[in-house]
Amino acid sequence: MNKLVFVLCATFLFTGCDDKDKDDTVLVYKYKGSVQCDVESGVPLDNMLSELIDANINVICSSEGNDGNVVVAVCGAETGVINVYEIPISSLITAENLGFNNVQLLEDAIVVMDCE
């Protein structure tokens, strides 16, 4: 009986938390282009999403983030907001050709991807 429980637990541990799909994806970003004191400025997340979809890139998840750099608090100055997309790693070069970059290039980026 103990061996059966051990085998079942081990099987669950190795298959129940499979992050294989996460290893096959990458986060890419492009600056939103928003400026301080203008809440309507910048390119909305969905508009940039269309760029990726039009290039036949499967977008798994999307979110706004921040590049993590300090910005001067002044109207008209950049906000540091980035639009971030989780895509298959096989589509990285295509996304880079569209002007997107790997989030790992931003040393202090603050990105929370909250998709299911």
Image: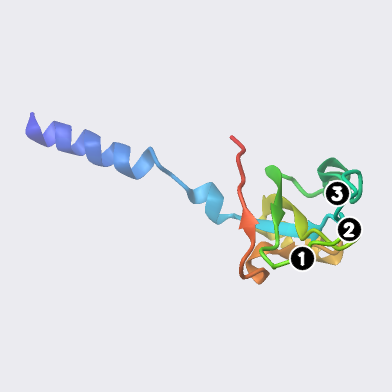
Mark 2 falls on what kind of element?
A: loop
Residue 21 at x, y percent in the picture? 54, 48
Residue 49 at x, y percent in the picture? 82, 45
The residue pinned by badge 2 equals 75
Q: Is residue 23 left or right of residue 50?
A: left
Disc marking residue 93? 1
Residue 61 at x, y percent in the picture? 68, 43
Residue situated furthest front in the rendering: 74
Dot in front, 2 or 3: 2
Closer to the camera, 27 or 14? 27
- What amino acid is at disc 3? Met
Q: Is residue 11 above or below residue 108?
A: above
- What amino acid is at disc 1? Ile
- First of labels 2, 3 by sequence position: 3
| Residue 78: quarter of image | bottom right
Scheme by which the image is coloured: rainbow
At x 60% / y 40%, what residue is drawn? 114
Per the model, the C-alpha gap separating discs 1 and 2 is 35 Å
The residue pinned by badge 3 equals 48
Mark 3 falls on what kind of element?
A: helix
| Residue 105: quarter of image | bottom right
Q: Few, some or many C-alpha atoms within 10 Å of disc 3 (few <14, some 14-19, many ≥20)?
A: many
Mark 1 falls on what kind of element?
A: helix
Q: Few, some or many C-alpha atoms within 10 Å of disc 1 (few <14, some 14-19, many ≥20)?
A: few
Q: Few, some or many C-alpha atoms within 10 Å of disc 2 (few <14, some 14-19, many ≥20)?
A: few
